[in-house]
Amino acid sequence: MSIVMRGEKGLTWCNSTKAYRGYTLFAPMGSKDVWLIDMQGNFVNRWRMPYKPACHGLLLPNGNLLYAGQLKSSREWGLPEGGFGGIGGILLEVDWEGNIIWKAEVPYQGHDFYPMENGHIMYKEVVYDNRSSKGFLPSELAAKIIGGRPGTEFNGEIWGDILVEIDRAGKVVWEWLAYEHLDPEIDTMCPLENRYQWPYINSVWVCRDGNVLVSCRHEHQIIKIDKATSKVVWRWGKGELGHQHDCRELDNGNILIFDNGVHRPTLEPSYSRSVEVNPKTNEIVWQYVADPPSDFFSAVCGGCERLPNGNTIICEATSGRMFEVTEKGELVWEYINPFVGPCASFTSTKLLFRAHRYGLDYPGLKGKDLDPERFAWANRFWGPTSLSREIKS
């Protein structure tokens, strides 16, 4: 077994016998670059995008990158600065060299998007009907929403969320207006949050049965939507989660969630964790918590993905830390984003929204030039160095 240890940036830990071999994709929030690295922390591809990331990028099976860019700032969209994180405005598909293959301007798109098997894209908008320039919830409904700090609405109003599915021509083929299907007495807001947005969706996932899984951050819960009827058919998280991000369905039917741990309704200090829930029993069947718990914490953003070998790769967003753990919680790979830049209210940050691992057999990597020598200049500055210390056991 070979374990590599390094400093406070780039690759810091790799157990090559237990980690899931592949390539890791990440988009530093403070720059316009998207990077792909190998297991040793070498850069093997770089996409130079025309916009900073609104959230993240995904490597598609055809080898192209699907990316949500920040077309305008929150203030330019007419939204409260810093209050609507992850606002984008444009979706791009680019090839391996960064040439634009497809794009769609999607006003008020925010936080997340999901490429569907039929080629359509599902994403969240921060308003419930931007096509007629209406962004606020009906006043009679807004008055019924329980929770949030009184008086913290945006100019006395509450913005709504909508899920949108578009085809490749940019045509809207399905949409879900949250305020029409949520219950203000059940889907209550965190009492410590501002009342400017309801329910503050920050993650979108289309399940194998075609139904839609979303994370409602301000409500501390995950919901599942029957796509055919638009009804909410499952809720989980009240009393357990704290402003979570990134919910996704696993192959076994369970739900994997990145739980940030902010304002969790307990007396414990804040800490983050990765949680796997059985939606049939509503029981937590697996979780990763650091020892001590405070060693893993991200107040915003973040994500986790189950890998084919049973490991889980986790993005501790605010520190720029990406790490992989086994089912037993053993750390087997760790990488720290070396890029620092301005993002939203941060003047200097390593912030990442999420990170994604692609196996050696992933179709999108077939035939691609993955030689780190193409980026020797970058690897000299930010990649593996002669200061690396290797421990064998």
Image (tube, helix red, strand yellow):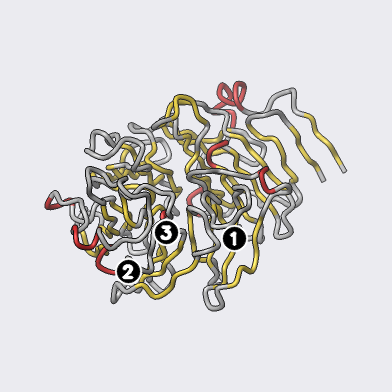
* Residue behind mark 2: 183
Quadrant in the rendering for residue 306? bottom right
Pointers 2 and 1 in contact (C-beta within 8 Å): no
Mark 2 against mark 1, which lies toward the viewer?
2
Residue identifier under label 3: 219
Which residue does the image show at 41% across and 43% down from the upper left? 55
Chain-order first, disc 3 or disc 2: 2
- Locate the C terminus and report the quarter of the image it occupies: top right
Q: Nearer the viewer, residue 370 or 248?
A: 248
Amino acid type, callout 2 = Asp
Q: Provide residue 211's location: percent of width, then percent of height.
A: 38, 71
Residue 349: percent from left, percent from top: 50, 29
Which residue is found at the position 64% from the left and 69% from the top? 285
Give the structural element (helix, strand or loop) at label 1: strand
Residue 389 sits in which quadrant? Answer: top right
Secondary structure beneath dot 3 equals helix
Q: Residue at x 32, y 37 (%)?
A: 70
The answer to whether residue 238 is above or below residue 346 is below
Q: Residues within 10 Å of mark 3 (few under 14, many from 20)?
A: many
| Residue that badge 1 annotates | 275
Q: CA distance from mark 3 to mark 2?
A: 11 Å
Q: Relative to residue 87, is residue 233 depicted above or below?
A: below
Q: In the rendered view, would you say 224 is above or below 113?
A: below
**Of callouts 1 and 3, the N-terminal one:** 3
Q: Is residue 46 left or right of residue 4?
A: left
Q: Secondary structure at mark 2?
A: loop
